[in-house]
Image: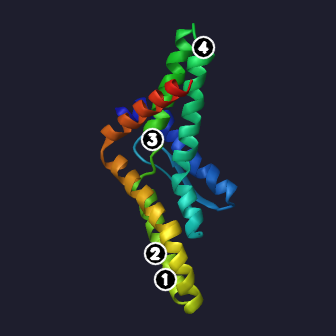
Amino acid sequence: MIRFLLYPGIIVHELSHTLMCAILSVKINGFKLGLRESHVKHEDTSAINIFLIAIAPFLFGISIAIIAIILSMKTFVHEIIPIIILNWLAISIIFYSIPSSQDTKNVKNSAVAYLGTLWKKGILGFLIIILYVPVILVPAYILLYLFDIFTKYEALRIVLILLTYILISYLL
């Protein structure tokens, strides 16, 4: 039932993956947009591309939701229907802006595979690993861990929605 009510968020989530694939020139092999199952399948690509594709729903989704919230607060002050629609869209988009557990799993697998290729390059690969792990991999894993928590506990998504509204109200 909740997937049906918040379906615009699912659409934005999958279209965000698709848009990031297009930006990065990553070929899309499959696209499904349904109430029970939705996904974007793409060709294998670099670890950084997989990371960007995985977090695209968060980046684009939060941006679109913020615009919808601001429009509802500033543009349609005395018109109830546009305010309701814009807020419903914002809530549904924020709710589904968190990368799925499959998205985070893909990033983790590609990062491990990338480390394996670096390890085979000898001393140069070892030096790159020394820089790559603390500067890129650790912050990425922390972000992915947070996304996994939000994926497992949907109540945290409601907290994210509330925090977004509070932050925008405070800034405006």
Sequence-first tag of 3 and 1: 3
Q: Where's residue 157, x and y in %?
A: 38, 39
Sequence-first tag of 2 and 3: 3
What is the C-alpha distance between the residues marked 3 and 1? 32 Å
Q: Quadrant of residue 35?
A: top left
Q: Which residue is mark 3?
A: 96
Cβ atoms at labels 2 and 3 below 8 Å apart: no
Residue visible at 44% across and 67% down? Answer: 108
Cβ atoms at labels 3 and 4 below 8 Å apart: no
> Hey, what amino acid is under mark 2?
Val
Sequence-first tag of 1 and 4: 4
Residue visible at 39% across and 44% down? Answer: 36
> Hey, what amino acid is under mark 3?
Tyr
Q: Where's residue 20, x and y in %?
A: 62, 53
Residue 112, labelled with which disc? 2
Sequence-first tag of 3 and 4: 4
Q: Where's residue 80, x and y in %?
A: 52, 10
Examine the rendering and report whether any part of residue 14 can be seen: no
Q: Which residue is mark 4?
A: 76
Q: Nearer the viewer, residue 88 or 114?
A: 114
Category of crowding for the residue at label 4, using alpha-carbon neighbours closer than 10 angstroms: few (below 14), some (14–19), many (at least 20) = some
Q: Which residue is mark 1?
A: 116
* Residue reaching furthest to the bottom: 122
> Hey, what amino acid is under mark 1?
Gly
| Secondary structure at numbered mark 2 | helix
Residue 142, labelled with which disc? none
What is the C-alpha distance between the residues marked 2 and 3? 27 Å
Q: Nearer the viewer, residue 172 or 56?
A: 172
